[in-house]
Image (cartoon, grey):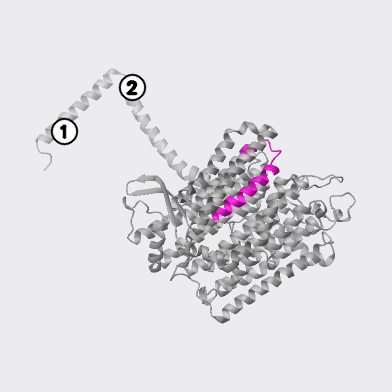
Amino acid sequence: MDAKLIWLTLLLPVAGAVVQTLLRSMSGTDGGKRLLGFLAVLPIAAAFLIGAMITKSMDPGQATTITQMSWIELKGLSIPFELRIDSLSMTMVLIITGIGALIHLYATGYMAKEKDYSRFFAYLNLFIASMLMLVLANNLLLLFVGWEGVGLCSYLLIGFWYEDKENAKAANKAFIVNRIGDFGLTIGLFLIVVAVAMAGKGIEAQDERYLSFDTILPVLQSSLVHHPALATAIALCLFVGACGKSAQFPLYLWLPDAMAGPTPVSALIHAATMVTSGVVLLNRMHIVFEMSAVASSVVCFVGAFTALFAAIIAFGQTDIKKVLAYSTVSQLGFMFVACGAGAYWVGLFHVTTHAFFKALLFLGSGAVIHAMAHEQDMRKYGKLYKYLPITFITMMIGYLAISGVPGLSGFYSKELILDSAMNSNLAMVKRINAAQVSGWICLLTALLTACYMTRMMMLTFAGKERWMEGSQDAEHATEEHEEHADEHDDDHHELSPSHRPHEVPISMWFPLAVLAVLSAAGGWYLNQGDRFKEFLASATTSTGFGNVIVADETEEQLGHMIGQIAMFGAFAGIIIGVLVYWRGLPKNGPLFNRVFGKTMAWSANQFGYDQAMVSAAVDGGNELATLTDEYVDRGLFGGIGEGIGKVSEGISAGVKRVQSGLVRVYALSMLIGVVGLVAYAVYLMQGGIK
């Protein structure tokens, strides 16, 4: 198939956004909404089909560059508008458009009663286009355009219900926190230009592909070996950017609040688009990280800590979407551990399997919320398997997949992450193996994941119908978090005791069924015969470079043993969760209070981290602005300005006395001037003072 058709995968979502904008007036009728929904899903589905055909016909070992036109022309610099077709970009294209099309289809039902229907789908189409730009870009500037486009679209979608103050605040928070990460990315891009220039590849007019990956990656691979400090600086700056987009500590705090947006937005951000940007960046620029053991170790440690920290916080959440949000943060930590250990393809493998089961879980949670009159508090659920059989069965598959149950997609990618970490020889200060330490942390996190996901499923689908009047469990609806007040309780709807949940329409459960199949068999299919590893080999490995050293026999045995332990850890976590929550909310006894009460309250509030960061940014910013205004603006510059003003006032007062308006005074002034000029001329003719 002609590779140039890749442009259609990018242009179709853009065209979809334009069409939605032009036909906005049709949002007022049911027929108009059906047409708009069809026109929203069609370009994404078509882009997926084109991407699939290109992927099938491409050579995974080769990269193809498609240049459309010259983009930026400056003196000494020429940058074309070009796309890159390789195994990394096409893997992401299939994830973005495939999962994206299912989410769009789901959204046609979920948002059916939304008045501003077309605006929502215009933003959603544009989001897909921005992410495709990011992954298909063949130079750093185009990648940066896609990177910022994703940030803008996330702001628009998270704040879609902008009339709600909490939604607007969440959108602002996401936008501002991501700017911190983007600052690091920008510095990293400038340092890459410096590194390439140092290698003798200065910006020349005839080099029209100066910032293209085909140009910079080989140069960086050969030059950064001799400049380890520069390699570390570049890698850490790029990692800061990745932390912002992929919600790693300390910049993760925007992602849970992003749940304020509609559920399809949550699914798209968490499963197929924005949060995977950082992992894509690390894969695309893996050569830089391979040059720095320090940077790779930092990636491992930050990823492992984020995974564990977010998993603990997830235990304290009562909002079903918040549980899944912190689950995403935790799973992203797993991906970063794999990349830090040098197993970049494994990190991308988990991106793929995670897209399957996390999209399923988010869309399933949306079905539950839809059925429960937009109530999101799990303490007010219970026994929903009876009313939502399709949602229950499909979510059960996604839950078992993320828990790491053998045979399902999450098991294969998680086991490979642990094996890669344990087999890595990534040494840091005092010979500490950063990857292996991170692997043990991820092993504990895997057990916690199975446990808190079991908690979510039990509270939602098991136990008693806690929204029913007279239910004993309803009396204990707040016992688990007696010291914690959910910040969004005011937004939740009070359910009527006579409320009867109902299964969602086919437009919503069909995507669940497709994602359930992928969650069940997708990991097995991609792992057969190292299919996924071989497909990504050319884009994620570098012969002769890297921090991962082939493990000896003992280390390989350790890695396989850890994989087996992870399997038992998944079952252990599930069993613990079932024992505690199978009847619903646990009763508030002395033992429970001593062991879990305080911890659950602390984890529900993120151990105070989010509040501390917001206070430091908002209150600290106000204090800094006040001090700057008082001492710098008014004190320093105001004092200087006041002094200059007084001097000017004195001069003007003196001049005012001379400018009396009397003709004789002006004649005298002219006479004095003429005499002065004559005297100066005589002085010059006599040769001046010798």
Q: Can residue 482 be seen in this view?
A: no
Q: What element carries label 2?
A: loop
Closer to the observer: label 2 or label 1? 1
In the displayed structure image, the side of residue 497 where residue 54 appears, left or right: left
Say whether residue 432 is left or right of residue 265. left
Residue 606 x, y percent position in the rendering: 68, 58
The magenta stretch spans residue 234: no
Q: In the image, is residue 99 part of the stretch drawn in magenta? A: yes
Amino acid type for the residue under numbered disc 1: Tyr
The C terminus: image quadrant: top left
Q: Do the residues labelled 2 and 1 touch (CB within 8 Å)?
A: no
Residue at far right of view: 470
Choose between 151 and 24: the one closer to the eye.
Answer: 24
Q: Residue at x 61, y 78 (%)?
A: 558
Q: Distance between the residues labelled 2 and 1?
A: 28 Å
Return the residue at label 1: 680
Number of residues whose C-alpha sits closer than 10 Å to that of mark 1, classed few (under 14), some (14–19) or many (20 or more): few
Of residues 330 and 505, which is closer to you in this image? 505
Q: Is residue 157 left or right of residue 670?
A: right
**Residue type, label 2:** Ser
- Report whether residue 422 is seen: yes
Q: Which of marks 2 and 1 is nearer the N terminus?
A: 2
| x, y percent for residue 579 | 81, 66
Secondary structure mainly formed by the magenta segment: helix
Q: Which residue lies furthest to the left in this view?
A: 686
Which disc is residue 355 wearing? Answer: none
Residue carrying label 2? 660
Magenta segment: 92-119
